[in-house]
Image (tube, rainbow, N blue to C red):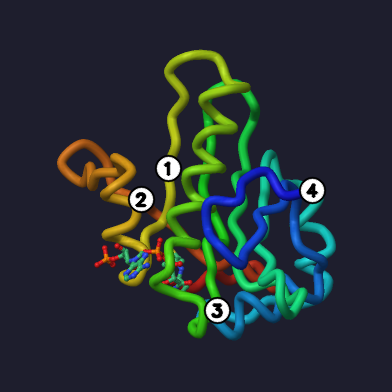
């Protein structure tokens, strides 16, 4: 069920998109492609998720997820909008909805983090995310089955 009619022609649905739509959204919005195996394991592990449907076509055109422990650690991932539907406020709608879930369900003083690719940085900054490299830096690696690791 749509929770908001704020963007004409689009409906925001709580919950993840299908694995097929998830993989398509990531790839078509320019994020690194993931595998079906990763998708079917990842999506049910979301603490909160929503996706946006173009009502006219029925196509899922945007999404976002939060992974977290429900107590205080929350991480925003997979904020993606198809290029043809960008710059209409969908990214803002998705992020606002996700952050509202934390405000409503988590105890006070939640720590919400994300890895900000260039296209999302202005959007994240508008919602209050700041760089904190003076305090601590994000560190990451790809961990491979042969025990090797490479930099993202
Ligand atoms: C980042 C991303 C999700 C933003 O989605 P979006 O739906 O375009 O986001 P919004 O429409 O809410 O905001 C984007 C811009 O459009 C503007 N905008 C929103 N509605 C608008 C409208 N009706 N008319 C004109 N501009 C509008 C916003 O002010 C914002 O401007 P800014 O970038 O100058 O600050 C999208 O660009 C994307 O999927 N990029 C590729 C994947 C990616 O990198 N994801 C982030 C991973 S960290």
In which quadrant of the rendered image does the C terminus lie?
bottom left
- Residue 42, given in percent of the width and then of the height, sits at 75, 57
The structure residue drawn at horizontal position 51% and vertical position 25%, both measured from the top left corner, is: 103
Name the element at disc 4.
loop
Instruction: State the residue at coordinates (58%, 71%).
Output: 148
Mark in front: 2 vs 4: 4
Q: Earlier in the sequence, mark 2 or mark 3?
A: 3
- Name the residue at 43% across, 61% down: 89
Which label's residue is closer to the chain start, 3 or 1?
3
**Disc 4 target residue:** 1
Along the polypeptide, which appears first: circle 2 or circle 1?
Answer: 1
CB atoms at circles 2 and 1 under 8 Å apart? Answer: yes
Q: Is mark 3 within 8 Å of ligand 1?
A: yes
Point 34% across, 52% down: residue = 124
Residue nearest the observer in this picture, 141 or 129: 129
Residue linked to disc 2: 138
Q: Residues within 10 Å of mark 2 (few under 14, many from 20)?
A: few
Crowding at mark 4 (Cα within 10 Å: few <14, some 14-19, many 20+) = few
- The answer to which image quadrant residue 3 occupies is top right
- Residue 82's disc is 3
At which x and y percent is residue 65? 62, 51
In the rendered view, does 141 fall on the left or right side of 39?
left
Residues at marks 4 and 3 touching, judged by CB atoms closer than 8 Å: no
Looking at marks 1 and 4 on the same chain, the residue that comes earlier in the sequence is marked by 4
Q: Secondary structure at mark 1?
A: strand
User: Can residue 145 be seen?
Assistant: no
Q: Is mark 1 within 8 Å of ligand 1?
A: no
- Which disc is residue 113 wearing? 1
């Amino acid at each position: 069920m749509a929770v908001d009619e704020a963007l004409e022609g689009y409906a925001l649905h709580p919950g993840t998109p299908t694995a097929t739509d998830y993989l398509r959204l990531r790839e078509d919005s320019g994020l690194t492609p993931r595998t079906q195996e990763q998708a079917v394991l990842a999506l049910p592990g979301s603490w909160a998720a929503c996706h946006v449907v173009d009502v006219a076509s029925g196509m899922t055109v945007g999404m976002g997820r939060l992974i977290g422990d429900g107590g205080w650690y929350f991480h925003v991932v997979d904020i993606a909008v198809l290029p043809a539907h960008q710059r209409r406020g969908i990214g803002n709608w998705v992020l606002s909805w996700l952050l509202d879930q934390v405000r409503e369900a988590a105890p006070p003083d939640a720590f919400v983090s994300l890895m900000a690719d260039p296209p999302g940085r202005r959007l994240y900054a508008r919602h209050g995310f700041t760089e904190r490299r003076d305090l601590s830096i994000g560190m990451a690696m790809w961990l491979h089955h042969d025990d090797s690791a490479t930099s993202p």
